[in-house]
Image: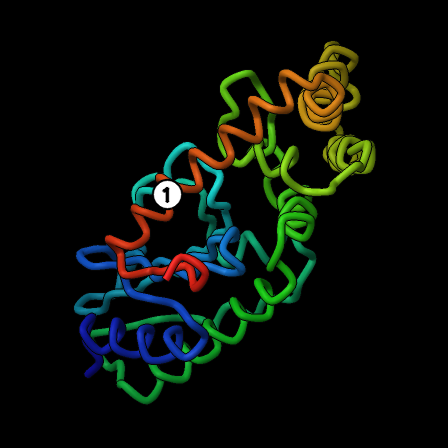
Amino acid sequence: MATESDLQKCLESNLSASGYIKLKNEKMFLKLVNGEILQFVSYYKVRTYRKGVCEFGISAGVSTIYRPSIDADILSRCEMSIKLLASRLNLPFDEPLYRLRIGGDSNVKALSSAVRNVSRFICKIFKSVTNLNEFVEFKKKTDVSSLTLRNDFPGDSLALIKSGNSDDFLNVYDDVIHSLRKSGICDCDNYGLICKNLYRETVEMTAGARDAVRSDPEKYSAAIDECERRRRENLALLKKYNVVCPEEG
């Protein structure tokens, strides 16, 4: 019978081979890529009605060193289940292949196989997110709200300033509207207002706000200064997790 300890060992063995480090006292594995990109994976219990059996799900996320904070609790809020990630990235997802089950009639061999499938799937998704431009593209597909740019630079919005991205984000807006039309919401009375708000959130508060900062020397300088401050503070926190940027020693 497989146990939670077996699950953790299997995850650690597979993910460490790809550069992930298990965070002490956390159910999270973290990887720093090119000194800027944070890739992280967590496991969590899911409800099951089978007596004596416990199942776990896997969530994963990508962030940057330019967030206001990269505490493990904060990063966990940036994750989503790998099933949802697959859906937003239009990737096939055969759920039984990734089922992590312990207790009952479970066994370590089956658990190890599922963990290998999970690790390969995550590596497949994240291999194309290794720099800020790729990160912005990834977030456009999975969670554009994390790029919303305001004066206090929330979430990962500074990635828009720091990267070379110059997209108008209209394709993001078009994709959202297309989904709404498929759901039939375009027939509601306030559809026009919904579209107006979505345009503001997906275009004006991302690409529009980015261009406004870049075109103002004072605002741009302040944004870059904030990038460097956050990078220093977050790299110091990563050292406590034993995650070290090579260039920092």
Q: Nearer the viewer, residue 224 or 128?
A: 224
Say few, some or many: other residues with alpha carbon within 10 Å of mark 1 (under 14 / 14 to 19 / 20 or more): some
What residue is rendered at 75% in x and 24% in y?
A: 211
Compared to 107, does 195 lie above or below? above
What residue is rendered at 18% in x and 73% in y?
A: 5
Compared to 17, does 176 lie above or below? above
Q: Nearer the viewer, residue 237 or 38?
A: 237
What residue is rendered at 37% in x and 75% in y?
A: 16
What residue is rendered at 37% in x and 43% in y?
A: 234
Q: Nearer the viewer, residue 200 or 238?
A: 238
Residue 113 in percent (x, y) is at 41, 84
Q: Nearer the viewer, residue 105 or 114?
A: 114
| Residue placed under numbered mark 1 in the picture | 234
Task: State the image quarter where residue 172 is shown.
Answer: top right
Callout 1, which amino acid?
A: Asn
Q: Quadrant of the C terminus?
A: bottom left
Residue 28 in percent (x, y) is at 31, 58
How many marks do you count on the picture?
A: 1
Local SS, label 1: helix
Q: How is the image coloured?
A: rainbow
Q: Quadrant of the N terminus?
A: bottom left
Residue 167 in percent (x, y) is at 80, 37
Is residue 57 rendered to the left or right of residue 177?
left
Task: State the image quarter where residue 44 is shown.
Answer: bottom left
Is residue 99 rendered to the left or right of residue 9?
right
Spot the residue most to the bottom. Answer: 109
Compared to 176, does 94 lie above or below? below
Residue 54 in percent (x, y) is at 24, 65
